[in-house]
Amino acid sequence: MAITMTPAATERVRSFLANRGKGVGLRLGLRTSGCSGMAYVLEFVDALNDDDEVFDIDGVKIIIDAKSFIYLQGIELDFVKEGLNEGFQFNNPNAKGECGCGESFTV
Amino acid sequence: MALLQIAEPGQSAAPHQHKLAVGIDLGTTNSLVAAVRSGETATLPDEHGLHSLPSIVRYTQDTVEVGALAALSSAQDPKNTIVSVKRFMGRSLADIKAGEQSFPYEFAESENGLPLFVTPQGQVNPVQVSAEILRPLIARAEKTLGGELQGVVITVPAYFDDAQRQGTKDAVALLGVKVLRLLNEPTAAAIAYGLDSKQEGVIAIYDLGGGTFDISVLRLNRGVFEVLATGGDSALGGDDFDHLLQEHMQQVWQLADIDVQLSRQLLIEARRVKEALTDASETEAKVILADGTELTQIVTKTEFDAMIAALVKKTIASCRRTLRDAGMTTDEVLETVMVGGSTRVPLVREQVEAFFGKPPLTSIDPDRVVAIGAAIQADILVGNKPDSDLLLLDVIPLSLGIETMGGLVEKVVSRNTTIPVARAQEFTTFKDGQTAMAFHVVQGERELVADCRSLARFTLKGIPPLAAGAAHIRVTFQVDADGLLSVTAMEKSTGVQSSIQVKPSFGLSDTEIATMLKDSMKYAKDDISRRMLAEQQVEAARVLESLNAALGKDGDLLTAQEREQIDLLMAKLAQLATGDDADAIQKAIERLDEQTQDFAARRMDNSIRVAFKGQSIDNI
C-alpha cells in the first residue's frame, strides 16, 4: 500500500466521519497553490468524481484523485498534538522543500 | 508546522488562509469558548483540561487575575474581585444602587452615569472587566487553532437591550478581535441541537444556571428565530439548591455557630452531594470539624427533592407565565432545550418534562450548549460552509421609534422585525420658519414617551425656513445584524443630515423588559385614550398658533363682533386643551373652524386681490 495512516490518524478520521453522519470518506489531495508550489487538501467527500480512486485503509475510505496520487505515493497521514493545538499532518517522502509552515511543498 | 483540519467538500483553505473563528459564551458565572474542527464542534479546554472559565476578575497592584485563580481570592479580597460583571453591563450606577442586591465593590460614576469599579489599578468599567474575561479565552482559542482568529460570535441574553449588546461588542473590540455577530443565548442553544434546519415551530429554552433562571420562547420561521417572550428570575439558580442542602446538613448535624471556614466546607460538600444525587438515590455527606471530629450523614434524593421542590415549582410557574405572554400553549411547543448546569438535577428534568408534556433535549452538555451553538454560527459566518447552509437571522426585542409632538411615540421599527433592517419615515416641522428639529429615539411598546425607554437624542439643524408642515424630514432607522441601532434624519430639499448611533447609556433588567411588555398590554386601552388626548392637544395648539398668526396679519378684515366671537372660542379652546377631555377639545376645534371659515375665505379673496392688482389679464 502506497499510502498509510498512523493509528492516531485512523482513529480520528473514523470518529470525525462518524460524527459528521454523512459522506463517502476522506479526500487527500493536492492543489497548486501556496508559497512553495503545492498545497495539501483534506476534505470530507459527499460525491465521487470520475478520476477518483477509493482506498480502504483499516476500514476508512480514503479518496484520492489520479493526479494527486502520483505525488502522494508513499505518504503517511498522522494526527499530532502540539500543546493545545492538534490536527493532521502529512509526512511526504516526495517533498523536496517545505515552506516554513509545512502547508505547501515542492516535489 | 501547521496542523490541518478536515474541511467540508470544496472548502479547503489556501495555505496560510485558514478561516478561524470561535463562539464564546460570556456567562454570568462561567464563560466558554468553542470551535468547529474537522466537522466536529466542541468547547476548547485550557492547559489543565478545564473547559469553563469562572467569570471572575481580580485586580491587584500590578496583575489582573482571571478565572479560578481570581475565585480563590474572592473571599479574602472581595473589594477588588469582581464577580458576575455581566449583571453590570449597560446599566447605570443609579440602577444598580436602586437594586436590592448590595455589592462589596467601591464604585465611582462615569460622566454618563455608568458604574466604574475602583481598583488598585485605577477605575475600570464593566466593558473592560468583561474584556479581561475574554482575553484568556481568545488566547486559548488562538493557541488551540494554531492561528489568529478572523472573528468571534458572542452570545448575549435574549433580553439584552441595545446598550448591553453594544457593551458586549465593545469588550471584544478592546481586544482587537472582530465580532462576526452577537447571538441570543437561547437561539445559540437551539442551533447547537440543529433545530434551525428542522421543521418550523415553537421552541422553549429552559436555562437554569448557577445564579439565574431564564425561559425563552422562540418561533422558528423560514430560518429566522423570533423571540416570542422571555421570562425568568435573575436571582434563582443552582447555588440556591446548594444553600438549601447546606442548611439541611447543618440542621442534621446540629451545628449552631459556624465560622466562615466551616461554612465554606459545608457549601463545597453540599455541592458535591447535589452532583452525586444526579445519578444516585442516596449519598453520604461528610465534613471534618476544626477539632478533627468527622461528621457523616446520608442524604437521599427524596430528601433533596423535597428541599428544592418549591424553587423548581417557581421556575415552572415562570414557564407558564412566559408561554402565556407568547400566546402559546404547551401543545404548540415542538421542542424544549435544556441549558445550564442545574438542569442536570433529575427533579428539574422531570418537572420540565411533565409541564411541556415531552422529554426535553439533554444530549449536549448543558453547560456547553450555548458556546457550541455560537461556534457553529461562527463557522458558517466566516465562510467554512458551502453557501447552501442558511444564515440565521434574529429579531429586535422591543419596538424602536421617535418622540413626536405631545410626548407621543411614533414607532418606526416594530418589535420582532427581523434584522438587519432599515426603515424610513417622513416627518415635518410644527412651526412656521422652524430651522431645527430635536429627535428623541425611544424603545418600548407603550404609546407615550414617558412610559418608554429613552435611547438617544440628537438635533437636525439647517432646515430651510418654511411654513409649518412644508419641510420633509426623512428619518431612517437602521439596525445591523447585531441589533445595534443608528438613526439618521435628512431634510430632503437641502440634503442636510444628522445621525446618531446608540451607545451604552442605561440598561434594563430582565424583569424590567418583561414589565414593559406586560404593561403595554395591560395599559393598551389607557394608552390609546391618552394618545388621543395628546393628539387633540397638539392639534389645538397648532390651530391656535396659526390662527393667531393670521389674526395678527389680517385681523382688520373682521368686524368687531366677529373678532369677539373668535376670541371667545379661542379662549375656550385654550382652556379645554389644558384639560383631559379629548372629545371636548375636538369639538371646540371644529367650532372654531366653522366660525373662522368666513375669515379664511376673506383672507383668500384679499390676497388674490393684492396679487392681481395692476396686472393685466395677459400676464396671468
Image (cartoon, coloured by chain):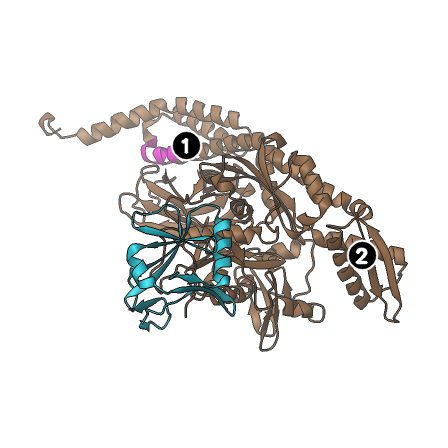
Chain colours: A cyan, B brown
User: In percent of the image, x 82 and y 55: which residue is there?
Assistant: B247
The question of residue B67 being in magenta is answered with no
User: In percent of the image, x 48 and y 26: which residue is there?
Assistant: B586
Marking on residue B246? 2
How many C-alpha atoms fall within 10 Å of the one at disc 1: few (<14), some, or many (≥20)? some
Q: Distance from label 1 to label 2 (Cα)? A: 71 Å
Q: Is residue B23 above or below residue A86?
A: above
Prevalent SS, magenta region: helix
Q: Which residues are magenta?
A: B546-555
- Kindly identify which chain the residue marked by label 1 belongs to: B
Residue type (three-letter) at the residue carrying disc 2: Gln
- Percent across and percent down for residue B234 are 65, 50
Screen quadrant of the N terminus of chain B:
bottom left
In the current view of this chain or complex, which residue is farthest to the bottom?
A: B62
- Percent across and percent down for residue A72 are 34, 62
- Kindly identify which chain the residue marked by label 2 belongs to: B
| 1 or 2: mark nearer the eye | 2
Position of residue B485 in the picture relative to residue B352 (left or right): left
Position of residue B262 in the picture relative to residue B57 (left or right): right
Residue on which disc 1 sits: B543
How many C-alpha atoms fall within 10 Å of the one at disc 2: few (<14), some, or many (≥20)? many
Earlier sequence position, callout 1 versus callout 2: 2
Q: Secondary structure at mark 2?
A: helix
